[in-house]
Image (cartoon, grey):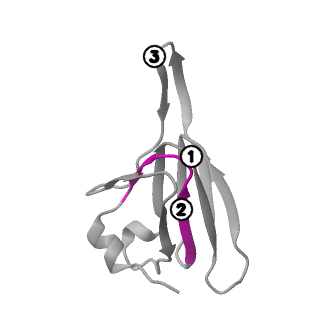
Amino acid sequence: MVRITPLELIGTDDRGYTCEYFHERMGRHLVIFRKAGTISGNHYHKGTSLSKQPEILILLSGTAILRYGNIQEAAIIRVELDVPSKIEIDPYVWHELETKTDCTLIELGSLSEHNADTYRI
């Protein structure tokens, strides 16, 4: 339903750290900046856009809470996200992201693909 993968730490020194991940998608992507205490999402995707099979987000900075669940079930799962994390959300999974701090994310897909495949319950 949802997979959260910590990014692979490949190096660290007094400047900070470096992570690596495989980038499986080409084309346009979104760089998203969200202020602390805001909520994004509150929707699901059917997977009609290729970038929503699954939806992939990379949390680059900040901390957030992801709430999600199958649209045909009442159960809501709550996960706290830390950086750096790759979040994969399958079609027909309702989801919303609440930022605890200012956050920066990359979404592997374009705004037009997102708009064409976004549904609210």
- Residue 15: give its label: 3
Amino acid type at image mark 3 = Arg
Total tally of numbered discs in the picture: 3
Q: Nearer the viewer, residue 91 or 30?
A: 30
Q: Which residue is mark 2?
A: 97
Q: Which mark's residue is nearer the viewer, 1 or 3? A: 1
Element class at badge 3: loop
Closest to the observer, 10 or 81:
81
- Residue at point 70%, 67% (across, down): 77
Q: Amino acid at mark 2?
A: Leu
* Segment tinted magenta in the rendering: 93-108
Most prominent secondary structure in the magenta stretch? strand
Q: Amino acid at mark 1?
A: Thr
Q: Nearer the viewer, mark 3 or mark 2?
A: 2
- As drawn, the residue found furthest toward the right would be 75
Pointer 2: residues within 10 angstroms few (<14), some, or many (20+)? many
Check the image and report above or below for 41 versus 19: below
Residue indicated by mark 1 = 63
